[in-house]
Image (cartoon, rainbow, N blue to C red):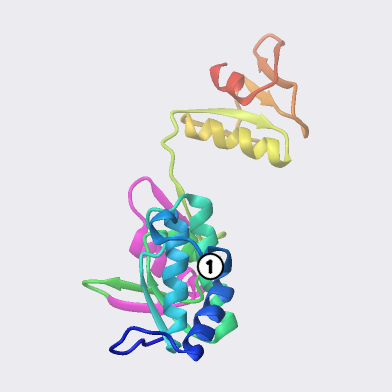
Amino acid sequence: PYTGFWGTLSGEDNEKVGRAMDLVGITYLADRMADTLSDGERQKVMIAKALAQETPVILLDEPTAFLDFPSKVEMMQLLQRLSRATGKTIYLSTHDLELALQIADKLWLMDKAMGINVGTPEDLALDSSLEHFFTREGVIFDRNTGLFRVEYACTGKIKLAGEGRIYNMVRKALLRNGVDARREVESDYYIDVGQDKGPFLLHAPGGHVNEVFTISEIIEW
């Protein structure tokens, strides 16, 4: 609301403020002083302030800056929900690419040489725009998931038998340590993680088998 020269709020203004706070879910902060708010609470207050202006478009500069990861996710989901509930267009700049790929309706990719490319995250993934803009040494754009992942430099390999969540977690840990571990690998040593947690069976040549119960022990082995 615009308070005018005297900086006072009318009854209608107060109603708009109340609606904005309710939409953002911060009515419980109504009696708090600004200097007692956390970074996440301050961001929500600023969003409510923008909503109270009742403009069709809201521009936000790095609204997830300085927030921890759960708060970043909460903030992006809040903005998406507000856009749906109010019919407003919300533009924001962000360095949180992974969240933008999963939550944003459209991305604007800006490049000095290529100009501006606009589209849904999925369209930009299919036409290789995201891959062109962001892939660097050590970073791979996964076309199957539409997300980025770290490229590991593997110096060894080992057969990894098993399936499900445990298999995926063990494979992830070994990749991080430079070991390509997959079912398809042929090696004298191999690891059998089964389907459930522990024991993990570590097979060495000559029929030697060690039993361990943690991924940390697998990595040490």
Indicate the quadrant where residue 162 lies.
top right
Closer to the camera in the image, 77 or 159: 77
Q: Which residue bears the numbered disc 1?
A: 103
Q: Would residue 180 be seen by someone viewing this image from the given angle?
A: no
Indicate the quadrant where residue 215 lies.
top right
Q: Quadrant of the N terminus?
A: bottom left
**54 left or right, relative to 215:** left
Q: Is residue 111 above or below residue 213?
A: below
Q: In the image, residue 106 lies at what x, y percent?
A: 46, 76
Task: Label 1: state its secondary structure.
Answer: helix
**148 left or right, relative to 8:** right
Q: Quadrant of the C terminus?
A: top right
**118 left or right, relative to 157:** left
Q: Which residues are magenta?
A: 115-142
Residue at the (74%, 29%) spot, across then down: 197
Residue at the (49%, 65%) spot, across then down: 101
Q: In the image, residue 68 lies at what x, y percent?
A: 46, 50
Residue at the (49%, 76%) spot, across then down: 120
| Residue at the left extreme, as displayed | 112
Q: In the image, residue 191 lies at what x, y percent?
A: 66, 24
Closer to the camera in the image, 155 or 176: 176
Q: Would residue 27 be seen by someone viewing this image from the given angle?
A: yes
